[in-house]
Image (cartoon, coloured by chain):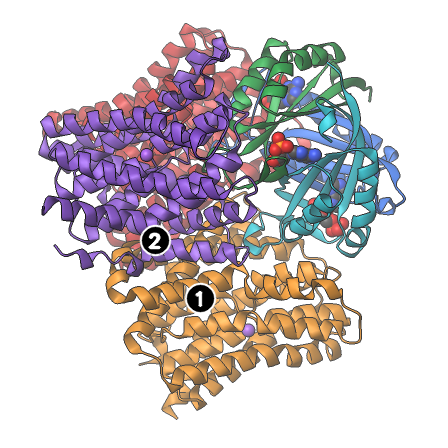
Chain colours: A blue, B cyan, C green, D orange, E red, F purple
Amino acid sequence: METVIRKRIEILVDTPLVRRVTDAIDRAEITGWSVLPVTSGSGRDGRWREERVMGTDKSLVLSIASAEKAEVLVDALAPLLTSHGLLLTMWNVEVIRGERF
Amino acid sequence: METVIRKRIEILVDTPLVRRVTDAIDRAEITGWSVLPVTSGSGRDGRWREERVMGTDKSLVLSIASAEKAEVLVDALAPLLTSHGLLLTMWNVEVIRGERF
Amino acid sequence: METVIRKRIEILVDTPLVRRVTDAIDRAEITGWSVLPVTSGSGRDGRWREERVMGTDKSLVLSIASAEKAEVLVDALAPLLTSHGLLLTMWNVEVIRGERF
Amino acid sequence: MEVSAFAPFASPVILFFLLGLLASALRSDLAIPEAIAKGMSLYLMAAIGLKGGVAVAKSGVNAEVAAALLAGLTFSFLIPVLAYAVLRGFAKLDQTNAGAVAAHYGSVSVVTFVTANELLGASGLVVAGFMVAVLAVMETPAILSGLMLARRGQNGEGQSRGELLREVFLNASVVLLLGSFAIGLIAGPKGYSEVQPLFESGFKGVLCLFLLDMGLIAARRLIDARALNLRLVILAIAFPLFNGLLGVMVGNLIGLDVATAAALGVLCASASYIAVPAAMRLALPQADPGIYLTMSLSITFPFNILIGISLFGEFSVWLSAH
Amino acid sequence: MEVSAFAPFASPVILFFLLGLLASALRSDLAIPEAIAKGMSLYLMAAIGLKGGVAVAKSGVNAEVAAALLAGLTFSFLIPVLAYAVLRGFAKLDQTNAGAVAAHYGSVSVVTFVTANELLGASGLVVAGFMVAVLAVMETPAILSGLMLARRGQNGEGQSRGELLREVFLNASVVLLLGSFAIGLIAGPKGYSEVQPLFESGFKGVLCLFLLDMGLIAARRLIDARALNLRLVILAIAFPLFNGLLGVMVGNLIGLDVATAAALGVLCASASYIAVPAAMRLALPQADPGIYLTMSLSITFPFNILIGISLFGEFSVWLSAH
Amino acid sequence: MEVSAFAPFASPVILFFLLGLLASALRSDLAIPEAIAKGMSLYLMAAIGLKGGVAVAKSGVNAEVAAALLAGLTFSFLIPVLAYAVLRGFAKLDQTNAGAVAAHYGSVSVVTFVTANELLGASGLVVAGFMVAVLAVMETPAILSGLMLARRGQNGEGQSRGELLREVFLNASVVLLLGSFAIGLIAGPKGYSEVQPLFESGFKGVLCLFLLDMGLIAARRLIDARALNLRLVILAIAFPLFNGLLGVMVGNLIGLDVATAAALGVLCASASYIAVPAAMRLALPQADPGIYLTMSLSITFPFNILIGISLFGEFSVWLSAH
Ligand SMILES: Nc1ncnc2c1ncn2[C@@H]1O[C@H](COP(=O)(O)O)[C@@H](O)[C@H]1O
Ligand SMILES: Nc1ncnc2c1ncn2[C@@H]1O[C@H](COP(=O)(O)O)[C@@H](O)[C@H]1O
Ligand SMILES: Nc1ncnc2c1ncn2[C@@H]1O[C@H](COP(=O)(O)O)[C@@H](O)[C@H]1O
Ligand code: NA
Ligand code: NA
Ligand code: NA
């Protein structure tokens, strides 16, 4: 089956901030996104675990987009990335039904 | 340590359909798969969130396979991909203990 | 925005063993890690599903690191990888704010 | 009893539902973890099943039960046909979406039934235990009807038909409802008394929290809805109204008591938002959940909870008095 | 009543909290699924809200209520100012972190309040139902105070101010507390009696399990803490002590009864670890959760549960007797 | 009491377990969210611990208690040795798998014990409260026995031994069982009465739902099993039979009452499927869960629930009468 190359963008973000990230994705006119739960983690600010009760847990926002739209998104997220310490990774993937993105 | 290159395939699929996807993976004689939960998302059909109660939530099926078997799988899934709107992405990864796959 | 290339390492591991993997990440002086839940899976040892009650479920540990540190980590994990049957995949990603890693 | 006895808006059950609708409308971040919501829905089904089974263990089975089961089965098969025609003619839906929506209206909503049981019960109208069995048998025939309508003249995916039937007849809610009904029947009042504290005392409180969540979800879905138009909104109210009144009349005709006839009306009026959507994702993936889920969950469900149940109750009272 | 009546360490509620602390200190893998913990916290808020609303439905509203609400509001606005000054001067925190910590101490902890209700109640001191409303109004003003202090002289992100206000005022716990308070008010004792088995009988047991979890989390966080120093630890005990005693005195002055004045003290003494941390992650991401969460959750919260509540209770008893 | 009083198949507890087995066998998609299942298992442990502690607070400690604890410890250490020999000789398992399976049979299943308590209690046989402590001390020695057998003559991973011991002795269920036992002891009947509604009234209902889930999981695992052979299946029934009858006899010899001796038999007969599998994944990763989990969870557990408990109860009644 034919595949096309798209960017896969994954952003690790505090759950209360998810909305701002997905709003940025919508504004970049990317067709969609999905959110995955994250259980625990550790970084410069120390460890966290099972803190959904406190609302300080994190989520992983994942979105597939064309390289151009991905760039638009990254630029739009840039201020949030630095101010709120988000973690953004991005790589090329083969996609089936790629005409949607 | 030595690594080999394999395909990592990730398929975003309605939870009630997971079984059909994993059956296809088994039929492609790939050694295994894992399923991750997805919390919410947005696409052409609009948003969804916390809909496990309605059984309309989605899951992410992840499988590591050799390039040949990955191709077999993609071809086997092709009808399901278009009819049920699955999202399949695929890329090369380095794997340790790659002889298993 | 500028990006740098880093390794993304994902390790599928029995939940009771997560601590040993993250300790190894810390010892490799990688800045952090995140853990994602896994719902079910299948491999050479058969299927498993919703076995959190039994404590035999699995998790996905994800870490972003420079290529050198990734290599240190992989070497450190090698014995665990073979003895406990972990699944490690690794690939290159573009990272924003890459100076942290 | 008097009509004025229906005062749903003073019941915590209804008030929590309204709180959920309101919180979502204000875009509050209030949310109940989905595992908890799922757990509560399983609890409600087990509890209602047990209670029904114990009631039948006490009352025994008679011709009334058979008549109610038959009526339920017939409604579940036929309502989709009627609904389909209206959806095609009046709302101009395509064949697939019309079939999918029709399946939802033929099937039933467990929580609407449970809420009706509580609201009617609070007015002294005690629904017969065997209606749980009617509830269970009404869940699936509509799915088959709806699918047949949606696929008329098309080539279905042959190999998966058997699988689909199994998925439909052994879906979680049917198995749990009928299973706990059977357990109630076998264990009887004595066995039931051991587990009564969990399944009976806690019931109404859990229903409150579950309806809070349903309110949150229903309003959120309505806010995000894109696919609805005015005609579909009208039908999402007209269907339960028509089916509900019809159900009460038939219930009255076949000799059900006031409360039980009202409950049959509620079953006819209610639209599924659990078993059927999942089945549609499998069998009719081209159908748009933005249409069928939004209609059944965000319009028909609130309509029934807030207005329908009381209305069918009052109609049944009125009917039995004339 | 006698001072010796306070025997918190024989109460299962406290003992489960200690078990949690101990299990974490020993690095046991005991853990409560987060969905369950979240569910329990929603349950506790709904239950306390309902109970308060029903109590007010019975007692009616009077000048005492207004005075308590006003006192609560004032404390929530002003405690952060005081705390901020001390955090800057004594603990040498930077502006951002001082503002963030200050916001936590001005706001309140629902679970501390609930536990105080139980412990005081067990000693015969019944807290007035309207204090639930005071609890709810004290949650958010402190967030605004703290943010203003943290951002003085800085350029805020203008566009998100409105959004922040909405998030703060419609956060889950405020909506659920006030919502169920209103439901209790409307439904009254009669409506409440239907759901009492779930919300009242189960309450203390759920509180035990929730405090077990809080003990686990609080101790784990303390063990992993890196950012605390001795001065911050001292303040995390001095703040609740000072604010709590002050709260009791003011409560006594404005004419609250013994139990209710003690509860006002507990509210002043308690520090938020739910609504405020989430708001700070949004509005002050540069502030370090290793400071504010560890202080409020791992030091102040245990201090209040194990010592503060009894102390404020005894102080209120003593005060009203002199 | 009469033997015919054992009627497990009319108890909702057993019927829900059967429903779970059946639903899985029919491949229904009925499933309980794992967070709920985990929460229920924690609840059951806390409840049984509390109840045992309160009972001992009332009855006090005596020589009988010491004897029962000693018997439990001895069984937990020695059963694996016996089982290991049979697994090697009769079932031809390799050293690693034989050690892993042996550890499971020496250890205990909390839910089997809890179910036995309920079923025996329903027949008027009240198990002594201190058996909860026996349950807790029997969990871990078997793990050590099993590991020693599995690793005989091999070089263990030296550095992780201490860590393993800590993980084994501080595993969640031991900590929660002993912790709530201690809380029950300290709080006594008066403190317990506050939390009784949650921990006692709800108990049997929660047990039903938990056993529903266990039935689902046990049957699913059996269906997916690949690694079992007939000899292993035979042993998975012979082990509980032999160990259970032996346990009852020893209980009778050391002077336990009828119910308590039966409970000791149940503990010996039961095989762990929570603490031990997790420990084995860590310490013996080469051992195959397809063998040890399937034997303990899918064969021994249903055997004990459906047959074993009644059998050991009747045997204990018979023994005490002769
Ligand atoms: N570009 C995308 N990136 C990531 N996830 C997506 C994307 N598009 C769609 N999805 C996910 O796939 C689901 C169905 O998409 P659709 O079929 O477009 O409605 C959405 O609800 C999202 O969870
Ligand atoms: N090829 C694969 N792709 C993705 N996940 C796998 C694969 N093989 C095994 N797994 C996961 O790893 C677990 C253990 O595999 P195994 O050690 O082969 O039994 C399985 O239960 C799956 O969750
Ligand atoms: N190198 C990393 N790899 C994966 N996740 C990370 C990494 N660094 C940080 N994280 C995640 O990001 C969160 C915040 O990181 P930080 O801002 O460094 O405290 C952590 O708690 C982890 O969940
Ligand atoms: Na219907
Ligand atoms: Na405060
Ligand atoms: Na045993």
**Three-letter amino acid code at the position of disc 2:** Gly
Give SS at disc 1.
Answer: helix
Instruction: Farthest residue to the bottom: give it.
Output: D322
Disc 2 crowd rating (10 Å Cα; few below 14, some 14-19, many 20+) is many
Q: How many marks?
A: 2
**Three-letter amino acid code at the position of disc 1:** Leu
Is residue E156 rendered to the left or right of residue F118? right
Residue F133 position, x and y percent, is 23, 30
Which of the chains bears the disc numbered 1? D
Answer yes or no: is residue A59 visible: no
- Can you say which quadrant of the picture contains the N terminus of chain F? bottom left
Disc 1 crowd rating (10 Å Cα; few below 14, some 14-19, many 20+) is many
**Is there a contact, CB below 8 Å, between mark 1 and mark 2?**
no
Residue B85 position, x and y percent, is 76, 52
Mark 1 vs mark 2, CA separation in Å: 35 Å
Q: Which residue position is annotated with label 1?
A: D178
Q: Relative to residue D93, is residue B49 depicted above or below?
A: above
Give SS at disc 2.
Answer: helix
Which one is in front in this view, the residue at disc 1 or the one at disc 2? 1
**Is the same chain shared between marks 1 and 2?**
no
Q: Which mark is residue C35?
A: none
Is residue E6 rendered to the left or right of residue D233? left
Residue F252 position, x and y percent, is 14, 37
Residue at 21% over, 28% down? F71
Q: Which mark is residue E184?
A: 2
Answer yes or no: is residue E310 visible: yes
Residue at 16% over, 38% down? F128
Which of the chains bears the disc numbered 2? E
- Which corner quadrant of the image does residue F19 belong to? bottom left
Residue E52 position, x and y percent, is 31, 46
Q: Relative to residue E195, is residue D85 depicted above or below?
A: below
Is residue F198 rendered to the left or right of residue F98? left
